[in-house]
Image: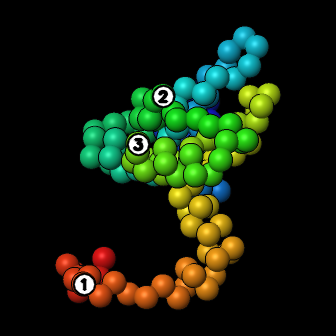
Amino acid sequence: MVAREDAPLEEVVESMRKEKVGSVVVISRGNAANKVVGIFTERDLLIRVMNEAITWNEPVRKFATSPATLMKADEPLRKAIYVMRKKNIRHIPIFEQDDSLLGVLSVRNIIRLLAEHFPAEVMNLPPRLNQKMLTPEGG
């Protein structure tokens, strides 16, 4: 999903809710092509918006993570996993070689992919013997 950098925050959050997505690529409309100026995620909503005294018609660019970490479609998945872990991010916009947006790779996408291709290994992992739960729910 894509939003203009000057789109009102309320409109972007409502679109995320309707489309059931966790992130929006924020773009600026330049002369020749759109340029990615950041990414607005559920985490940005919780950390940068919810505890602040804001008006919901402010532009989304004020709350987006900028610059966004971007990757090309031909780069290996292991690199995306490494970058996500190193930068503590959960979403990476993926671009084709012609710089057109292909989509957004999320941690959820990666987990689904692994579970689909290795169901026995993922679903039948033994518990860690020395693991101690800190909360009654185990989380």
Q: In this orientation, which residue lies closer to the viewer: 5 or 112?
A: 112
In this figure, which residue is indicated by the disc labeled 1?
A: 130
Q: Residue 44 carries which label?
A: none
Instruction: Give yes or no for contact between labels 1 and 2 (Cβ–Cβ under 8 Å).
Output: no
132 in relation to 89, above or below: below
The extreme top residue here reads 31
Quadrant occupied by the C terminus:
bottom left
Residue 69 in sight from this viewpoint: yes
Q: In this orientation, which residue lies closer to the viewer: 31 or 138?
A: 138
- Image location of residue 128, percent across then percent down: 34, 84
What secondary structure is marked by label 1? loop
In this figure, which residue is indicated by the disc labeled 2?
A: 67
Mark 3 or 2 closer to N-term? 2
**Circle 2: residue type:** Pro
**Circle 1: residue type:** Asn
The scheme the figure's colours follow is rainbow
Between circles 1 and 2, the one closer to the viewer is: 1
In this figure, which residue is indicated by the disc labeled 3?
A: 87
Please tell me in which quadrant of the rendered image residue 113 appears.
bottom right
What secondary structure is marked by label 3? helix
Badge 3: residue crowd in 10 Å (few <14, some 14–19, many ≥20): few
